[in-house]
Amino acid sequence: MRFTDEQEELRTAVRKLLGRHPGEEAWRPLAEQIGAAGLAVPEEYGGAGCGAVEVHVVMEELGRELSPVPYLGSAVLATQALLASGSAAECAALLPGLVSGGTTAALAWAEAGSWDPGAVRAEAVPGPGGGWLLTGVKEHVLDGSRAGTLLVAARTAAGVSLFAVAGDGPGVGREESVPMDASRAQTRVVLSGARGRLVGVDGDGGRVLRHVLDLACTALAAEQVGTAARCLELTVAYAAERVQFGRPIGSFQAVKHRLADAYVLVESARSAALGAAFAAADGARGPELTRLAATAGSVCSEACSEVAGEMIQLHGGIGVTWEHDAHRYFKRAHGSARLFGPPHWHRARLADALGLPDPVLVPVPTPEAAPVSR
């Protein structure tokens, strides 16, 4: 698995742009100058007609910078949900605006901390004029507060379905969440008879969400690789300049071992993420893609968390101060490890895709509290 010259040029362009435009300022130029928002969108809707590998390149660079732009929420989740729905009318109506970056959309999907399509409990009933009325609560909606359109998963008599709801429409309440990672904007959406229109086929939302979940894990894995790689780079640089007992701490054998272990974690995660991205780009779907995406979701989440933890440890006291970015990477790593489901849930998905029994999770016994001396 190797990147093409064009993909390497895309990486260079994104990295330079993020260096010139910090924070949310990067979104417009990313969409307008590089066309990042439309990389995986067919040309008929104004996109570049590329695929998951190009998305991997962009996500990896965004992970390095902890960029707060709405790429994952709008350009990956919402865009891929529209494409997977098979609704040519909704794609034609919404995708050109998303590709240009002029508007964003958000996929309102998770409920009660679960991204399992089977856990959807929000309801949709027929409304006046052929529309639908939606009621329910959605959590962890990425960039949901500023999205012009919400793609909401809700149940009808036919099963889980997907609906397009105006973000500022009647019956839509949006509450900003306060996540551990402040650079990942999340919203709680409360629907009270909100008006929506069906996207795709009634009852086909479960299939759509399962496919989007695989693509979401694939994209997030790329971001986690970028985050972990940046953590390692910063830690290696610090180990070379931080002097203790008259020598750089990076010259101590124990520190070398820890950095070497972190390097192995980063490269193992990179392999898992690329495996899923190249498979998705080649058209893999269903159990085949789920196996690779679930593997990447588990491996990359744990690797990113461990490498970010080593960054904190090897930076010492400065690693837990506001003056250094180490704590920001640590928060991103642990927040991402819960996004789209924790690692053990992805291992269960992998077992299911392989036709194996679910992994048995053995509870760790809690030691009895020691008596307190008074």
Image (cartoon, helix red, strand yellow):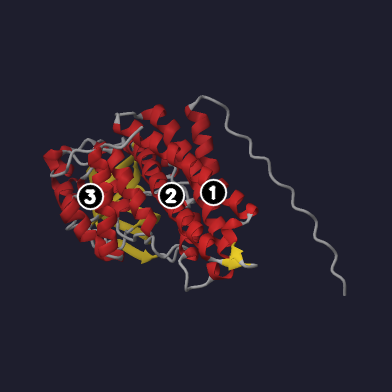
Of the numbered discs in the image, which one, if any, rests on residue 262?
1
Side of 49 where 258 appears, left or right = right
Q: Position of residue 211 (x, y in %)?
A: 35, 36
Side of 98 where 341 appears, left or right = right
Q: Residue at x 25, y 64 (%)?
A: 20
Side of 137 where 264 appears, left or right = right
For label 1, the SS is helix
- Give whichever of discs 2 and 1 has the lower sequence position: 2
Looking at the rendering, in which quadrant would you find the N terminus?
top left
Task: Measure how far apart labels 2 and 1 are at the Cα level.
Answer: 14 Å
CB contact under 8 Å: marks 3 and 2: no
Looking at the rendering, in which quadrant would you find the C terminus?
bottom right
CB contact under 8 Å: marks 1 and 3: no
- The residue lying toward the viewer, choosing from 11 and 189, is 11
Q: Residue at x 44, y 62 (%)?
A: 181
Q: Which residue is mark 3?
A: 36
